Structure formats: C-alpha cells, structure tokens
Amino acid sequence: MQKRIFDIVFSFVVLSLFLWLLIISWFIAAIDTRTNGIFTQQRIGQHGRKFTILKLRTIKNDLLSGKQTISKMGFFLRKYKLDELPQLLNILSGKMSVVGPRPDLEGYYDLLEGESKKIVQLKPGLTSAASLKYINEEEILKKQNDPLLYNMTVIFPDKVQMNLAYFYNHSVFGDFKIILKTVIKVWF
C-alpha cells in the first residue's frame, strides 16, 4: 500500500511539474514521425496480465524504403527518456510502478519458471536497477553477431536475476536510490 501511495504522489507531482515538457515532446514526436505521436503496445504486467503501455512515438516509416527508423528527434527523446513520460499515466492507473522490472513483450516474463516467476508478482516499473545497467541495451545488441541469442543468453538472464533480487529486497529507500541514480544517469 505504501508503494502505491508513493507511485500516485510521485506521478502526480512529476506530471504537474513537467506536463509542459510532455506536451512539447508529444508535439515534436507527432510532427517528426508524422503520426499522432503516441506509441502503444501490449506488455506483460503484474501477475502476467497484459496491459497497454504508453510512450511517445520515436520511430517513423520511411515512405521510400518502407523501413522503420528512429526519427531525428526520436534519438533525442530516447536519449533523455522523454519518450517514457506517458508511462506516468500507466503508473497513475495502477498498471505500473515508478520502480520495478521494466515491462516486457509477450514471450519473456510470461514464460519464466520456478523462482524467477516471482518477478511477475511485481508491477512493472518506469525504472529499475536492471534498466540502469542496460541503459544502452540497443547499442550493446548492435555489437553482437547474434543479438537475439545474446539477449536470451546474457542480458535477459542477468535482468531476471537483478529483478529477482529487487523482489526480495525492495524498499521505499531503495526505490529512492534507484530513482536518483536514474535521474543522474539520464540527465547528467
């Protein structure tokens, strides 16, 4: 209950202070990607239930090649995690928490077995120790000969262990430390 109250207060305060930044970022995303600027996707949430995650759209369709690429401003929005701001609404609605395992696509957390399955008892989070460690995950995967294999054999198992450690040891003080580390790593 204490964590839920913290999530509501934190999300409300951050949205109140940075609503202007969210609106500007959304406007930039809409113009840059030539869409409505919002990206939605089904993710696995608490207890393995699906929910719709909200993000700012950073990928656009190249009309000439038909390929999807990160837009010019999308790089900026991703670098400073501004594309994640709409997830504060996911937190207010109770689908996410400020700190917890990052919500994953179907085929990852929902397939965990044994003790690792405990991770899905937690609400997915906006940030976590694992997401901080792998803040440049896309860059790491680009350097691999087989990115999918590397993700499944190295990164994902490491994230599972880190998230399992969070399951057993999370606290409000620990969450504050993760939030502070996130702000420092992303903005400084």
Image (cartoon, grey):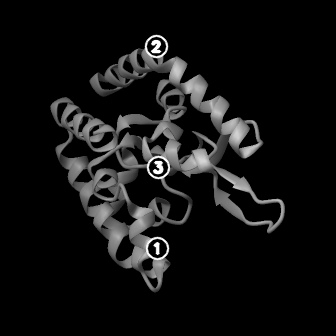
Amino acid at pointer 3:
Pro
**Circle 1 — which element?**
helix
- Give whichever of discs 1 and 2 has the lower sequence position: 2
Residue 175: x percent and y percent? Answer: 23, 35
In the image, which is nearer the foreground, mark 2 or mark 3? Answer: 2
In the image, which is nearer the foreground, mark 1 or mark 2? Answer: 1
Residue 23: x percent and y percent? Answer: 60, 23
Q: Which mark is residue 103?
A: 3
Quote the CA–CA distance across marks 1 and 2: 37 Å
Residue highlighted by disc 2: 16
- Give whichever of discs 1 and 3 has the lower sequence position: 3
Q: Which mark is residue 142?
A: 1
Vertical relation: 152 (above or below) 162: below
Amino acid at pointer 1:
Lys
Vertical relation: 63 (above or below) 15: below
| Residue 122 appearing in the image | yes
Between 129 and 56, the residue placed more toward the observer is: 56
